[in-house]
Amino acid sequence: MIEIPSMRSETRYGIPMADQILFNREYIVGYSYLFRQPRWVMEVIDPDNKAVVVKRIDSFRPDFRVPEKFRADLDDYKKSGFDRGHLVSSADRRATAIKNSETFLLTNMSPQAPKLNQQIWRLHEDAVRNLSNLYVEVYVIAGPLFSIGKPIQEIGVGEVKIPVPHAYFKSVLAEDVKGRMKLWSFIFPNEGSRKPFADFLVTTREVEIRAGLSLWDRLRGANIEGMKRRKTKMWDTAKAARAAEKRAAGDID
């Protein structure tokens, strides 16, 4: 039997559970029928597949691969006060128009507070893109988090309601040319913040417990378990940005 992780580069180090798994050209969604939004998204970022060739498409639309009774629609977000927040960034997929367009499927969206989506979440997306200039490949899993016991706000019209997450996680696995790995995980409350990224670092184990997911589960052994249980020091974002500028200028080591 062929395993899914052998078919797609995004799943090389594992793929979490979901109600429906949606394969796009350069990212994968684990969709939640209960939440009417992604439970998680997965992508690989490297300097080649994030090359800027096309403009942002802005083609927000429903994903008709999802059964209608579980599907989010554009009207659900109208006048809700929340952004249609990308979990896989549009700027990560700009090599072709169709790859960029796929990031605007509502199965890649979650109701994010505007001050999160337009500020620290966007800045963190930029930082992860720049990190890919320091490593051969950067694997990313991101998704919403709900806090048990806290009130949950809903948006939506008709029978379909979309719960608003209390927070979002992002787990970043970076691999260098010698196969050495670094693992960083973050939890961002669904609100604005001007704090540094390091303030949102958590252990990957905490993300797994809060999300109810097993991350990077094809990596086995004491080393990966140790990585999951400790916070890795925040990478040097200034160094990563300089590396991105060098690559953009054609001065590649």
Image (cartoon, grey):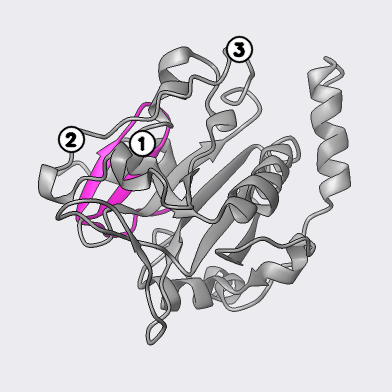
Q: Are marks 1 and 3 in contact (CB under 8 Å)?
A: no
With 2 as the anchor, is 219 left or right in this view? right
Q: Secondary structure at mark 3?
A: loop
Q: Quadrant of residue 213?
A: bottom left
Disc number for residue 65: 2
Alpha carbon separation for disc pair 1 and 2: 19 Å
Does residue 74 sit above or below 187 in this rendering? above
Cα distance in 3D space between marks 2 and 3 = 28 Å
Question: Taking 64 as reference, is 47 left or right?
Answer: right
Q: Give the magenta-colored segment's residue range.
A: 12-32
State the mark number for residue 53: 3
Quarter holding the N terminus?
top left
**Residue type pointed to by label 3:** Val
Residue 201 falls inside the magenta stretch = no
The quarter of the picture where residue 127 lies is top right
Tell me, yes or no, if residue 227 can be seen here.
yes
Residue identified by numbered label 1: 8
Q: Is residue 249 left or right of residue 60?
A: right
Which one is nearer the viewer's eye here, 251 or 162? 162
Percent coordinates x, y for residue 93 in the rendering: 52, 26
Residue 38's mark? none
Q: Earlier in the sequence, mark 2 or mark 3?
A: 3
Nearer to the camera, 153 or 211: 153
